[in-house]
Amino acid sequence: MDQLWANRAASSEAAVAQRHLKRLWALPGTQLGVVAWPSTRKDRLFGTWHYWWQAHLLDCLVDAQLRDPRPDRRARINRQVRSHRLRNNFSWTNSYYDDMAWLALALERADRIAGVTRRRALPKLADQFVKAWVPEDGGGIPWRKQDQFFNAPANGPAGIFLARYGDRLKRAEQMGDWIDRTLIDPETHLVFDGIKAGSLVRAQYTYCQGVVLGLETELAARTGNDRHRARVHRLVAAVGEHMAPSGVLRGAGGGDGGLFAGVTARYLALVATALPGDSADDAAARDTARAIVLSSAKSAWDYRQTVDGLPLFGAFWDRDAELPSAQGEKAQFVEGAVYASEVAERDLSVQLSGWMLMEAACNVTAVSGT
């Protein structure tokens, strides 16, 4: 592993730990991520907590444990898992399938990589995704319960989880095929957001590309079917052309959008390290994915601010990060989505994304040794 990226990932972890990790309601043995820094009293009391942001915090902690296994971090992972369920009213589930998919992915990795196991959680979450599959309604699985919006941010991560967990590979493959049939832009080859009542929602977000890359890479590795590799080749090229034209993944501001580019970097790193095959197209996809991760990471690091010796990442990795203050509008939860703070860098999502990117750079350099 490249020591430079390992050091930068460790600094990113320390920054989030120092500014955002706090005991839940002062209870011993607990920890969640405070959603803003600087924070308000309501933030510190976890009046707002954002389920899917906490799932990504857990995933980043697992990344760090993979990079540098430590007993104290394993304890931190365990606290995060315990507190997530506690804050979620002693439940793993909620009404949003995309939220639950992110948590399922993080819990599966916490079990496999860090040995932090919750025996009931994974079967319960897997059951949610399997039962939500409604091809007769045009899906896919929906974005949330009692909804007719079938989108990539729910089907992508749920598919990755089902590919990795238990014997659900066939359903994961059906999900990949549904996305490919329904949500691919014939002109750019990018992934559309979703389909609602039969109409395409044509927005194209970075993380939609990321989760489909993750799903198709898992399917390529696990099924050996060439069509999955071909889809990865096509989508990596499209991301390079349209979502990282200067080599740096484009940002989407704060709030929920703060996580989009980080998620994309995570799954580009998976392509770089796990896409099978030795054809020229396979090599090109891996090389392109790796190059986007590394040039994004270099840029995000160069444009960071430093506070108390630790990095503060920008919401856009190709321009200077802005220092947030305790004043100004804070992120708001509206209609199932979190909108950005006035200064996006205040949002935990933005800082998790930067950390995720540094861990992704670590992973791609670990394989190639450069």
Image: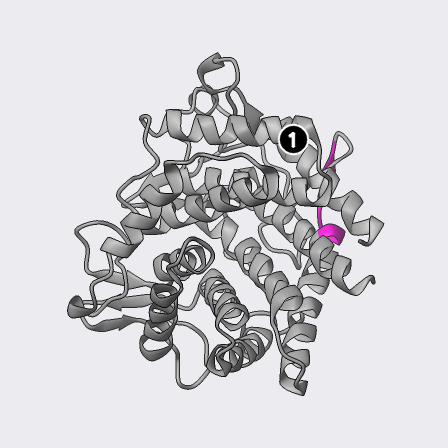
Quadrant in which the C terminus appears: bottom right
Which class describes the residues within 10 Å of circle 1: few (<14), some (14-19), or many (20+)?
A: some
Residue 306 in magenta?
yes
Q: Residue 238, can we see it?
A: yes
- Which residues, given as a range, are shown in magenta? 301-307
Q: Where in the figure is residue 179, as x and y percent of width and height?
A: 36, 72
Q: Residue 344, can we see it?
A: no
Q: Where in the figure is residue 168, as x and y percent of width and height?
A: 37, 60
Q: Number of callouts in the render?
A: 1
The correct choice, above or below, for 364 with respect to 181 in the image is: above
Q: Amino acid at mark 1?
A: Arg
Q: Nearer the viewer, residue 346 or 111?
A: 111
Q: Nearer the viewer, residue 115 or 185?
A: 115
Q: Is 220 left, or right, of 363 in this rendering?
A: left
Residue pictured at 55% horizontal, 73% vertical: 239
Q: Nearer the viewer, residue 346 or 46?
A: 46
Instruction: Identify the secondary structure beneath mark 1.
Output: helix
Which residue is labeled 1 in the image? 73
Q: Where in the figure is residue 275, as x and y percent of width and height?
A: 60, 71
Residue 177 in magenta?
no
Residue pictured at 71% horizontal, 61% vertical: 364
